[in-house]
Image (spheres, rainbow, N blue to C red):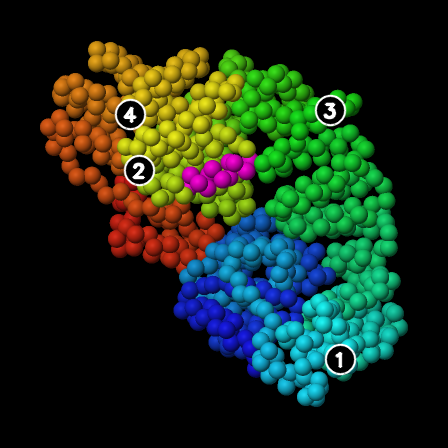
């Protein structure tokens, strides 16, 4: 019977009922130790006799072992592994140590999701995770990944954890458990095994402070003596300590062994080796543990932590030493390493070396958080400064792989003062700089410059440090400063033996040459490194600014195929983000939308917010062209937020330009000016002379021209024309000519418009061409030349219609009607679908089944059904064939990407 938790039980019961109806959900119970989380989980089990129960409890001593919790949870489902896609089955089997292999973390999460979905096909499933804050990081991330992607399954997830501890379950709905009300506490007090005299009730109630476990366990004599100011955790500790201390010494040591190791086998072997006999029987008689064949369970999860915390340091070391000796098998070597480390009082190279090997095995299974923890502990055990620095550096890299860049940065900065080896020090500094920039806080430039003066620095590290300075200067639009170091960076790069290190360093030097206007050197470098077909896809923005569209598209196609084949999801997300911007420049909104719609949820799934922002900026632009204000504004906001954190001025400008284009399409030039004028002023104060980096300037000129401020328009056009002429970029020269036509007199406007058309007609820039034809046609119509105007306006209208650019299509239609031409009603555009819905719609149009789509984008088939149902409702359609026809019209499957 659960007392005093009727309110908390309601959402739990609702979660179970919704799961039975095929509406998956996750609920996280949060509360202090002993407040009733475990009891509420037990009540959930009682309410779900018809559901298949999968349970795991986090144990602090197992939190360093990758996928230990996942193995406990999924063990009853392993017979279903053959039903999974081969890649997911292999990844999950490798993670759970069922077979050899190095699993991809994303594939493990996807495999966990698929396995749970297969189980839910047979019966509704209830997943119960107690002490989830002690689950190993790899297991917690895989389970959170799966839980986020459940929408239409008969599956419920309940997780209990303590407050103030960061876990992957932060994003789920939370139910806070506070102290029991006084009357409920009084009712619970009546259920104690030890009766409480009426005279002592108020004293016990006050001592427990509403904590149910303390109410049931606190001895009366302690309740009488406990000061009122005693904190809750101390009350709970005292509730059990007296009972533990009343045990004989061998039983207390046996209980400590059990607290330090959850497997009863080595606990019994260690106890025998210590001559303790069968020490857990007294603890069982005292109601502290439950024993059975292969089972050793504490009365309450919190008791395990209290037993371990209350033991003396010497007793803990002795227990770990005995457990290490009891774990002699090859399969137990990682547990043994951790016990050996815990038995060390100070530093110990042998123990550190064991943990370093454990880290390697954890990395091989995709458990990067466990790898990081093992390396970090190995570093603390290292008696020599060189090993300490080296292992902290390795731990930092592992934390980055595990997605905790903040922890990685902390270890990097801790290691810097003890890194006597100049090469290790340079590696640490470069890693610190890369991390800080992603977090929006650069390392001071002088620090890198000082590091470059160190003797013995090899070319790779020299180039890496120089690239940090160059990239920081480029991010801040200090192109002249970047150019000053570019030759030195190029020279260092040419001495690097490693291919990837060499070409990426050469690319950084090429970027500096390009933005600063040394176009011959930039062209030579980017031509040189493009001999490797992967490289343009690695530097998509530079190749886009150079207008090498065919080379970039070919590289993106090839590397996307490689990324998909190898399961490199980070590369797929980066690739599709670059592809979205390429297709956007070429005016292929359908292909841009499809690439961005794939990149956004994938980048979010693998924890790369910068890529989410870059792809969101491209999709915001698509929505701007199509006049979808709400979607454009939301995505541009996400893009702006991500770019601001990393100090990326280029992608900040992309986001603001999308909002400005939306305003121009809606006939609000003043709003466009408000977005673009600050960007233009920032550019004017910089040394950037590559027009591709500031593509928003022609929009600002048009906005000023439309608003009637021809003077400001001409000023910005003159400034932009200088760099456009110097760079000889087709789109920039054409944009200048279009803007010149907008500002020219009635006698002089035709020549610039014709010059713009001559530049654009042979190019792939479809929407730039349509926009120029629209502006030209508008001026022709206003001069009374209706026949000439119609030719330009018809072509513009068709081009805008083909890409679903509704506001611009409507503007062209209005102009055509003003010439006396009949214009058909505009096609109904797709409404504002989410990136996930857009991506699924595109895959449906390609003929993929729900199961194929689910495997491709790491969702369950029923979740795909859920998204499709939403899409059908928004579009007011009823079949996949109708959806395919709409996608073919609004998102043409015209690209190889």
Q: Give the CA distance from mark 2 to mark 1.
A: 73 Å
Which quadrant would residue 511 be assigned to in this image?
top right
Name the residue: 76% across, 50% down.
377
Mark seen at residue 224 = 1
Mark seen at residue 450 = 3
Mark closest to the chain's N terminus, 4 or 3: 3
Q: Give the CA distance from mark 3 to mark 1.
A: 65 Å
Mark closest to the chain's N terminus, 2 or 1: 1
Q: Give the CA distance from mark 4 to mark 2.
A: 20 Å
Mark closest to the chain's N terminus, 4 or 2: 2
Q: Is residue 891 left or right of residue 187?
A: left
Instruction: Tell me, yes or no, whether the highlighted magenta stretch contains residue 642.
Output: yes
Q: Nearer the viewer, residue 110 or 180?
A: 180
Mark seen at residue 537 = none
Of the residues tagged 3 and 1, which is closer to the observer? Answer: 1
Q: Give percent across and percent down for residue 812.
A: 21, 30
Range drawn in magenta: 635-646
Magenta stretch: helix, strand or loop mostly: helix
Of the residues tagged 4 and 2, which is closer to the observer? Answer: 4
Name the residue: 45% across, 48% down.
856
Return the residue at label 2: 626
In which quadrant will I find the C terminus? Answer: top left
Q: Nearer the viewer, residue 859 or 472?
A: 472
Neighbourhood count class around disc 2 (C-alpha, 10 Å): few under 14, some 14–19, many 20 upward: many
Return the residue at label 4: 706
Q: Give percent across and percent down for residue 197.
A: 70, 88
Kind of element beneath mark 2? loop
């Amino acid at each position: 019977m659960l007392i005093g938790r009727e309110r908390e039980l309601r959402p739990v019961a609702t979660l179970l009922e919704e799961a039975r109806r095929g509406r998956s959900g996750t609920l996280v119970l949060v509360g202090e130790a002993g407040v009733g989380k475990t009891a509420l989980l037990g009540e959930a089990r009682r309410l779900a006799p018809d559901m298949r129960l999968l349970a795991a409890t986090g144990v602090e001593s197992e939190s360093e072992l990758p996928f230990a919790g996942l193995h406990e949870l999924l063990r009853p489902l392993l017979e279903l592994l053959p039903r999974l896609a081969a890649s997911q089955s292999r990844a999950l089997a490798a993670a759970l140590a069922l077979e050899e292999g190095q699993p991809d973390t994303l594939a493990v999460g996807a495999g966990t999701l698929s396995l749970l979905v297969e189980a839910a096909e047979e019966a509704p499933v209830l997943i119960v995770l107690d002490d989830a804050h002690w689950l190993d990081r790899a297991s917690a991330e895989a389970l959170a990944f799966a839980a986020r992607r459940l929408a239409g399954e008969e599956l419920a997830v309940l997780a209990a954890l303590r407050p103030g501890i960061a876990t992957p379950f932060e994003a789920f709905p939370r139910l806070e458990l506070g102290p029991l009300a006084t009357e409920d506490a009084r009712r619970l007090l009546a259920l104690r095994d030890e009766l409480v005299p009426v005279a002592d009730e108020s004293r016990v109630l006050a001592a427990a402070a509403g904590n149910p476990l303390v109410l049931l366990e606190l001895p009366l004599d302690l309740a009488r003596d406990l000061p009122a100011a005693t904190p809750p955790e101390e009350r709970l500790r005292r509730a059990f300590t007296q009972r533990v201390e009343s045990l004989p010494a061998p039983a207390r040591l046996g209980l400590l062994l059990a607290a330090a190791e959850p497997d009863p086998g080595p606990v019994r072997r260690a106890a025998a080796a210590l001559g303790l006999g069968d020490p857990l029987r007294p603890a069982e008689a005292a109601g502290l543990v439950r024993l059975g064949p292969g089972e050793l369970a504490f009365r309450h999860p919190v008791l395990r932590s209290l037993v371990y915390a209350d033991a003396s340091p010497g007793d803990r070391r002795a227990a770990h030493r005995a457990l290490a000796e009891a774990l002699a098998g090859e399969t137990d070597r990682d547990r043994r390493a951790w016990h050996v480390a815990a038995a060390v009082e100070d530093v110990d190279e042998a123990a550190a070396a064991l943990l370093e090997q454990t880290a390697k095995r954890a990395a091989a299974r995709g458990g990067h958080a466990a790898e990081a923890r093992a390396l970090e502990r190995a570093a603390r055990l290292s008696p020599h400064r060189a090993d300490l620095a080296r292992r902290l550096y390795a731990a930092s890299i592992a934390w980055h792989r595990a997605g905790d860049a903040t922890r990685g940065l902390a270890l990097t900065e801790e290691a810097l003062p003890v890194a006597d080896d100049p090469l290790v020090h340079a590696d640490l500094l470069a890693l610190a700089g890369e991390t800080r920039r992603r977090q929006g806080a650069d390392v001071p430039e002088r620090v890198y410059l000082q590091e470059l003066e160190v003797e013995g620095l090899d070319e790779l590290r020299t180039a890496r440090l120089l690239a940090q300075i160059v990239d920081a200067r480029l991010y801040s639009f200090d192109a002249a400063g970047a150019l000053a170091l570019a030759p030195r960076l190029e020279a260092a790069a040419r001495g690097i033996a490693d291919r990837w290190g060499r070409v990426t360093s050469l690319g950084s030097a090429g970027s500096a040459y390009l933005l600063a206007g040394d176009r011959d050197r930039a062209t030579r470098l980017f031509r040189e490194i493009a001999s490797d077909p992967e490289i343009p896809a690695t530097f998509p923005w530079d190749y886009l600014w150079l207008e090498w569209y065919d080379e970039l598209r070919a590289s993106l196609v090839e590397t996307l195929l490689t990324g998909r084949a190898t399961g490199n999801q980070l590369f797929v997300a980066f690739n599709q983000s670059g592809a979205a911007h390429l297709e956007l420049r070429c005016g292929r909104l359908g292909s841009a939308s499809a690439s961005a719609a794939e990149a956004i949820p994938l980048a979010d799934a693998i924890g790369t917010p910068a890529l989410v922002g870059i792809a969101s900026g491209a999709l915001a632009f698509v929505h701007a062209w199509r006049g979808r204000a709400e979607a454009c504004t939301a995505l541009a906001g996400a893009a702006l937020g991500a770019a601001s954190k990393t100090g990326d001025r280029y992608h900040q400008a992309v986001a603001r330009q999308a909002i400005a284009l939306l305003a121009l399409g809606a006939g609000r030039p003043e709003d466009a000016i408000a977005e673009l004028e600050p960007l233009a002023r920032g550019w004017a104060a910089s040394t950037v002379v590559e027009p591709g980096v500031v593509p928003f300037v022609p929009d600002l000129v048009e906005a000023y021209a439309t608003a009637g401020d021809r003077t400001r328009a001409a000023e910005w056009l003159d400034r932009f024309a200088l760099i456009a002429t110097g760079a000889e970029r087709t789109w920039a020269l054409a944009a200048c000519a279009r803007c010149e036509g907008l500002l020219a007199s009635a006698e002089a406007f035709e020549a610039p418009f014709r010059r713009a058309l001559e530049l654009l007609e042979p190019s792939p820039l479809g929407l730039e061409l349509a926009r120029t034809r629209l502006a030209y046609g508008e001026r022709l119509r206003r001069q009374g030349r209706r026949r000439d105007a119609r030719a330009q306006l018809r072509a513009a209208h068709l081009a805008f219609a083909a890409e679903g650019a509704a506001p611009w299509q409507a503007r062209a239609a209005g102009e055509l009607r003003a010439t006396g031409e009949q214009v058909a009603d505009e096609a109904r555009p797709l409404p504002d679908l989410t990136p996930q819905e857009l991506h699924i719609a595109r895959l449906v149009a390609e003929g993929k089944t729900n199961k194929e789509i689910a495997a491709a984008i790491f969702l369950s088939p029923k979740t795909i059904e859920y998204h499709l149902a939403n899409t059908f409702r928004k579009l007011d359609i009823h079949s996949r064939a109708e959806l395919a026809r709409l996608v073919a019209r609004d998102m043409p499957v015209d690209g190889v990407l």
